[in-house]
Amino acid sequence: MIYKLYFSVSNMDERNDYWVPLMNYFLAQSDNIEIHCWSEEEVVVEETKSILKGSFEINLENNLTIFKGNVAPDLVNHLLWCNNVNVEGKIKWFSIFLSKNATAIFSSEHWGTEFFATNVDEKDIAFIKSVMPKETNFHQYMK
């Protein structure tokens, strides 16, 4: 069976070691990415611009800087392995949306505390639950 899965962790939880394996899992299935940063977070916006080096479409919308483009190894490396938390210990990017063939498959939102997977099976759900903290809230829906 195929499911939609929403899951979240408490903002009070300082631990975010689940984020890299979770993102790695879904980035491997994606061909397109959209990254949302609050425009006022100038350091994150400028750092993201410098990593993407003009290869992404950049839009400003409702106080957000939105980066859209194809998933590429240098981007994956930056997101997963190169200092992905800010000085407060939160994931740097407000939201990240992943898609495959123009179909949404996964999102990490609110600095890596809320997630939505749109097309997962029991194997995917087992993996997600294996990396998420025990106190994670899960809501599973049949597709």
Image (cartoon, rainbow, N blue to C red):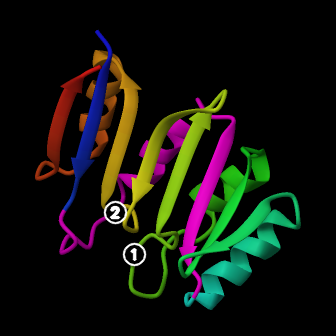
Residue 71, numbered circle: none
Residue tagged by mark 2? 16
Q: Earlier in the sequence, mark 1 or mark 2?
A: 2
Residue type at mark 2 is: Asn
- Depicted 100 relative to depicted 67: above or below: above
Range drawn in magenta = 10-39
Element marked by disc 1: loop
Q: Residue at x 67, y 27 (%)?
A: 101
Count residues near mark 1 (Cα–Cα under 10 Å), then give few for <14, some for 14-19, many for 20+: some
Question: For the N terminus, which image quadrant?
Answer: top left
Tell me whether circle 1 and circle 2 mark residues in contact (CB < 8 Å).
Answer: yes
13 relative position to 60: left or right: left
Q: Residue 39's x, y, as percent?
A: 59, 84
Q: Residue 69's x, y, as percent?
A: 75, 50
Q: Residue at x 37, y 66 (%)?
A: 110
Residue type at mark 1 is: Lys
Corner quadrant of residue 91: bottom left
Element marked by disc 2: loop
Q: Residue at x 53, y 49 (%)?
A: 97
Judge whether residue 15 is colored magenta: yes
Mark 1 and mark 2: span between their CA atoms? 8 Å
Residue 90, numbered circle: 1
Q: Residue at x 38, y 36 (%)?
A: 117
Q: Residue 21's x, y, as percent?
A: 45, 45
Judge whether residue 56 is colored magenta: no
> Which of 117 and 129 lies nearest the eye of the viewer?
117
6 relative position to 52: left or right: left
